[in-house]
């Protein structure tokens, strides 16, 4: 259901400067000014799970190829109605247009509780890699799976923290729009893990025991640097990082900002194609697959228009991270001939705690040398 906001509870935000698409081509991403190389494929997942075995195999093969070569893809045919997307966008607009003092009322009591409002310049995503960088420009609001969602289980109340919501009638509408989107994004994430199982040659439903009380988190990001505020030369909207969990489902404005790190060390700008959602893999899937599939490094540079002026950008990342107590061990088909793996086993909860202590707790993560080694020396300095 689309979110309805009373006019007296809505503050008009600065409009988003949209990028026009000159010639979108099926199977490619469309960068700013319509000139993207065909490096991030578009996959139509609408036939998935139907009776057409050939269509299912084609989708699994396309996803496998994207996961091996890029670690990112765009999907269409995801089935999320326009009204649900509009509800999410309206919720983002409403909350981030509030005065800063009102937004701060929705902050979590401590960084280890990944809920509620995060003010600008209070996180450094590169710290999750053990890499030093300036503070990130974005502000965010996090919602996630809570203890109360699983009354039959005994779960850690800090990992599965209850959500924090803004007050008042506008807050009720905000909650409705956010939770409706979160349910839809969760369905897409589970569709992707079912495709992953087929693409990796695993039995149907292989990943379900690892995700039946998944630490799912929706992070709504807002990039809107106030006029007159200086941005440092190396300052990012969101610093370079890999995502932490299994798979990320991303909705974003079709404006510049997001970039992915290519094998040659250069950064490729990515702008979502019309109607598409971006999908990327997290560290846990790289561990499962022993790097057969890529957890791709990415960042968000301060969004600018063609004239170089800073512009507003919105995004919403749904992180499907797996059960806190799930042990992630490299899959047998992905191990070396001698049965070895490049990764030690780790629980989802321990891995996420290490990452979040960096990005939110601002303690350089000493357990991400493998990921950090991909960054060029000029991005930041790894922890000694």
Image: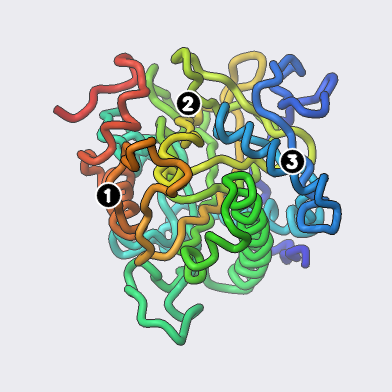
Q: Out of 24 and 351, give the one closest to the viewer.
A: 351
Q: Quadrant of the C terminus?
A: top left
Q: Out of 287 and 32, give the one closest to the viewer.
A: 287
As measured in the structure, the alpha-carbon distance from the residue carrying label 2 to the one carrying label 3 is 34 Å
SS assignment at label 1: helix
Residue at horizontal 64 percent and vertical 21 percent from the top: 305
Say left or right for 335 vs 353: right
Residue 257's mark? none
- As displayed, is residue 103 above or below residue 71? below
Q: Which residue is mark 3?
A: 276
Picture quadrant of residue 69 = top right
Residue 354's mark? 1
Picture quadrant of residue 4 = bottom right
Give coordinates of residue 120: x percent, y percent: 41, 42
Q: Out of 168 and 188, give the one closest to the viewer.
A: 188
Residue at horizontal 68 percent and vertical 51 percent from the top: 89
Is the C-beta separation of discs 1 and 3 under 8 Å?
no
Say left or right for 135 vs 202: left
Q: Which residue is mark 2?
A: 228
Residue sitting farthest toward the front: 338
Give coordinates of residue 64: x percent, y percent: 62, 37
- As displayed, is residue 316 above or below residue 133? below
The disc, 2 or 3, on the residue closer to the chain's N-terminal end is 2
As measured in the structure, the alpha-carbon distance from the residue carrying label 1 to the one carrying label 3 is 32 Å
As measured in the structure, the alpha-carbon distance from the residue carrying label 1 to the one carrying label 2 is 36 Å
């Amino acid at each position: 259901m689309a979110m309805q906001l009373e006019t007296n509870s809505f503050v008009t935000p600065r409009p988003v400067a949209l990028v026009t698409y000159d010639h979108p081509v099926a199977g490619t991403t469309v960068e700013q000014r319509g000139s993207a190389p065909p490096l991030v494929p578009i996959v139509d997942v609408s036939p998935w799970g139907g009776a057409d075995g050939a269509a299912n195999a084609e989708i699994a093969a396309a996803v496998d190829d994207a996961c091996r070569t890029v670690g990112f893809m765009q999907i269409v045919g995801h089935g999320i109605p326009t009204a649900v997307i509009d509800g999410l966008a309206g919720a983002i607009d409403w909350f981030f247009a509030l005065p800063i003092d009102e937004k701060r009322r929705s902050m979590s009591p401590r960084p280890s509780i990944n809920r509620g409002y995060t003010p600008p310049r209070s996180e450094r995503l590169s710290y999750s890699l053990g890499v030093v960088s300036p503070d990130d420009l974005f502000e965010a609001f996090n919602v996630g799976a809570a203890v109360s969602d699983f009354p039959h289980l005994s779960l850690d109340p800090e990992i599965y923290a209850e959500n924090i919501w803004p007050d008042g009638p506008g807050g009720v509408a905000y909650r409705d729009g956010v939770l409706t989107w979160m349910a839809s994004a969760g369905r897409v994430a589970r569709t992707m893990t079912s495709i992953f199982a087929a693409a990796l040659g695993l039995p149907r439903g292989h990943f379900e025991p690892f995700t039946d009380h998944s630490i799912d988190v929706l992070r709504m990001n807002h990039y809107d640097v106030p006029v007159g505020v200086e941005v440092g030369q190396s300052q990012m909207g969101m610093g370079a990082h890999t995502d932490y969990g299994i798979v990320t489902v991303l909705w974003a404005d079709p404006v510049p900002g997001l970039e992915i790190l290519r094998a040659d060390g250069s950064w490729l700008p990515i702008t979502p194609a019309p109607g598409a959602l971006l999908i990327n893999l997290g560290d846990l899937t790289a561990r499962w697959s022993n790097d057969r599939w890529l957890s791709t490094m990415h960042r968000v540079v301060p969004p600018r228009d063609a004239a170089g002026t800073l512009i507003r950008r919105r995004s919403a990342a749904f992180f499907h991270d797996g059960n806190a107590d799930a042990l992630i061990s490299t899959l047998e088909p992905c191990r070396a001939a001698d049965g070895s793996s490049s990764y030690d086993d780790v629980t989802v909860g321990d891995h996420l705690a290490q990452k979040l202590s960096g990005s939110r707790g601002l303690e350089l993560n000493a357990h991400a040398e493998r990921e950090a080694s991909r960054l060029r020396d000029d991005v930041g300095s790894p922890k000694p």
